[in-house]
Image: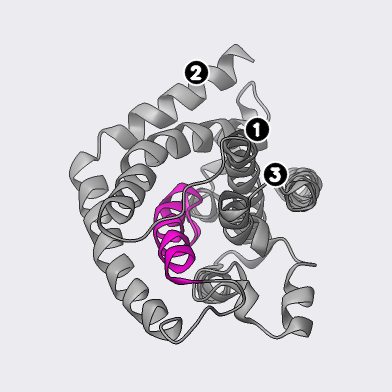
């Protein structure tokens, strides 16, 4: 456990060295947040849509802008690049399990992103636009929801990167994942805006657990236990799937190496 705690600390320190990139990303989030809010504000100007009034739409927008970096919504390609070059073999021989080791590092990254990329856009939106703060009883549930969102996102990204063991180059799949996730997770528009059948179908996938679920918990008047249960289910499911896929990939590497 000490090794994984050190990896989390290393992840925090690693991303804290890129201060200019982080602040540039934060500024980009704020600018695009204002653009997205202008569109949603125009949509709800004649009346609430699916329970979203101006304050809820503003809160949804700024939470979404902050969560994008926290959960790495577009995915990452560090593991896939190491698989493509063969450097992952070194990682597999290290005295740790690769999946929890990478997850620990991602937790450290997420902790730094929470401070630099999540909090500032939310604070900016809360100061300058209508904003709906959560009830005190909801705050612990929101914190749990953030952890589950990060876990689910990491599990999906790990599975995406692990496909490189078979595809060798997963850039096409990565691009498809990035494009589809923005819509399926609730970033493009709230999932409540979708038709009933589409909304129901989407909640049977892990994507809402990454972004829409934390926002729903934040905007709720009481802890949404069913939403948290949905997140917990998918967090466990994608992490377990990643473990199985990695085991199969390791056997493939061993066989090819032999």
- Which SS class for mark 2? helix
Residue range in magenta is 53-78
As drawn, the residue found furthest toward the left would be: 20
Q: Is residue 206 magenta?
A: no
Q: Which residue is mark 2?
A: 6
Is residue 210 shown left or right of residue 11?
right
Among numbered discs 1 and 2, the one appearing first in the sequence = 2
Q: Position of residue 170 (x, y in %)?
A: 56, 67
Comparing 20 with 52, the one in front is 52
Q: Is residue 66 magenta?
A: yes
Residue 95 visible in the current orientation: yes
What crowding class fits label 1: few (fewer than 14 Cα within 10 Å), some (14-19), or many (20 or more)? Answer: some
Comparing 64 with 151, the one in front is 64
Residue 42 occupies quadrant = bottom left
With respect to residue 188, does 137 lie above or below?
A: above
Residue 258 visible in the current orientation: no
Q: Which residue is mark 3?
A: 223
């Amino acid at each position: 456990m000490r090794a994984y705690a050190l990896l989390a600390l290393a992840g925090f320190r690693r991303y804290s060295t890129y201060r200019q990139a982080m602040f540039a990303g934060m500024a980009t989030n704020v600018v695009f947040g204002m653009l997205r809010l202008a569109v949603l504000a125009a949509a709800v100007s004649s009346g609430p849509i699916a329970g979203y009034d101006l304050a809820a739409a503003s809160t949804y927008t700024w939470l979404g802008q902050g969560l994008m970096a926290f959960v790495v919504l577009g995915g990452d390609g560090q593991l896939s690049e190491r698989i493509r070059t063969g450097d992952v073999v070194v990682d597999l021989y290290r005295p740790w399990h690769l999946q929890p080791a990478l997850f620990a590092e991602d937790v450290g990254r997420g902790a730094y992103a929470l401070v630099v990329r999540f909090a500032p856009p939310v604070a900016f939106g809360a100061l300058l636009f209508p904003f709906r703060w959560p009830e005190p009883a909801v705050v612990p549930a929101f914190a749990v929801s953030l952890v589950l969102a990060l876990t689910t996102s990491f599990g999906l990204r790990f599975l995406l990167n692990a496909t490189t063991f078979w595809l060798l180059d997963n850039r096409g799949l990565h691009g498809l994942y990035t494009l589809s996730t923005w819509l399926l997770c609730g970033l493009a528009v709230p999932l409540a805006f979708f038709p009933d059948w589409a909304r129901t179908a989407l909640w049977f996938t892990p994507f809402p657990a990454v972004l829409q679920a934390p926002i729903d918990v934040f905007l709720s008047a009481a802890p949404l236990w069913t939403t948290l249960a949905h997140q917990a289910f998918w967090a466990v499911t994608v992490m377990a799937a990643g473990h199985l896929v990695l085991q199969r990939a390791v056997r493939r590497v061993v066989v090819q190496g032999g």
